[in-house]
Image (spheres, rainbow, N blue to C red):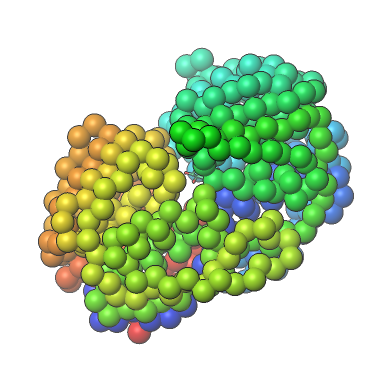
Amino acid sequence: MGDLVVRRAARLRGRPALPGDKSISHRALLLALLAPGESRITAAGDGEDVRSTAGVVRALGATVERLAEHDGRVDYRIVSPGGSALAEPEAVLDCGNSGTTTRLVAGLLAGRPLFAVLDGDASLRRRPMGRVVEPLRAMGASFAGRRGATLLPLAVTGCAAPQPIDYPTPVPSAQVKSAILLAALAAHGETRVTEAVATRDHTERMLRTRGVSVTEATFGDGRHEVRLRGPSTVEAVDETVPSDPSGAAFWLVAGAIHPDAELVLEGVSTNPTRRAIIDILRRMGADIEERDRPAPDGADGEPLADLVVRSSRLRAVDLGPSEVAAAIDEIPVLCLAAAAADGTTRIRGAGELRHKESDRIAGIAAGLTALGARVRVEGDDIEIDGGRRLVGAVTETLDDHRLAMTFAVAGLLAEGETTVLRPESAAISYPGFFRELEGVRA
Ligand code: S3P
């Protein structure tokens, strides 16, 4: 696809089709690999990241059948010999652009007596892997790779009987927590992971649905611990994947900042560990109506809602490190909301954004500045003076899906034409996003 030109829209209306939740889709595939027998996954995300996980699941010995495709989603049927009978992969496991695939698979492999090599694209080869290698080594797995095995490509030799560990994570990361929990399934004894703030809890919910006992506790200072006693087998279940709140975020911001908008987002997970974007936008004054919706069978108890967002007058907000962690994937598009809000928004402690698919602090600052916003970056803090008129410009996506979609949404509001360079990365998490973008122009 060539560069994308987005013109200002007069009105926004409609029900954009949303992708299946990416975090849940990855986990549903990996847990289907660990569960002996047949698992069905309905309405999974069909972005390139989830396809990377499906490829790894196949390479480790399961059959993965794509039963049907609909609205950028896919239904899978997976038949696996189970975690104790995984195949040693013959070739390098290609994780593409997906950090979640890499880190969760590293954990899964750490607890199995196999040799494998994980690799990915240029962006993934720059991302820090030491954060999973360190605890997984403490559990008994061996890793080899560049710079002390902190970067891909990474060779993993897992072990049949990993050690349980008691691990306080140095950065709040659901990927790190999940990697340790997947290794802990094979360990004899109790593993405990403690986080400074609770990160997304899909792994915990999904393990419980599959017969694994996982307990959690939150302390007065916000710390959160998860315990899993191994060894434990994973049962095959059928799963229906909710709509991705991180995909919905682009429409929530589009609807809130556009002067004539009403958009409906169906079946979005409002899981307390994922809904920060809704609550932060509401605090900024966004008109977001939440209509609870019964969850289908096999939705792991994820609360669901239809969200209706309407044009709103937004005001600036102050966000600290724990809110940044809770809305980590939504911060780029929240910066766009801040650019359209009255007052100065301050986002403190956003350093993790530098370790995503691109340096998202640099990327968002450059793109919004090109569009006429006033953005200051000091270390890991971002300040945005809102209320300035956005004017169409050329924006650089750094091949990062969340930047590509943020600048495309900015184009709906900015005067004239906004050019989004190399926009195709949107398909990493949201295939069909640009079709929906055309569709909402009433
Ligand atoms: C994810 C966790 C987050 C998030 C990523 C998906 C997951 O990463 O940014 O898009 O599915 O566990 P970190 O755990 O590195 O913060």
Residue 298: name its quadrant: bottom right
The number of numbered discs placed on residues in the rendered structure image is: 0
Residue 88 visible in image? no
Question: Where is 338 relative to 252, above or below?
Answer: above
Residue 418: name its quadrant: bottom left
Q: Residue at x 85, y 35 (%)?
A: 85
Q: Which residue lies furthest to the bottom in this view?
A: 442
Residue 24 rendering spot, x and y as whole percentages: 62, 52
Question: Where is 124 relative to 394, above or below?
Answer: above
Left or right: where does residue 262 sit relative to residue 107? left
Quarter of the image that includes the C terminus: bottom left
Q: Which residue is drawn at 43% across and 53% down?
A: 276
In-front residue for pair 363/300 = 300
Residue 240 rendering spot, x and y as whole percentages: 69, 62
Left or right: where does residue 318 sit relative to residue 238? left
In-front residue for pair 426/345 = 345
Quarter of the image that includes the N terminus: bottom left
Residue 219 rendering spot, x and y as whole percentages: 53, 34
In-front residue for pair 231/84 = 231
Residue 178 rendering spot, x and y as whole percentages: 62, 37
In-front residue for pair 67/273 = 273
Left or right: where does residue 260 sit relative to residue 29? left
Residue 69 visible in image? yes
Q: Residue furthest front?
A: 220
Left or right: where does residue 194 sit relative to residue 208? left
Q: Which residue is drawn at 29% across and 60% down?
A: 284
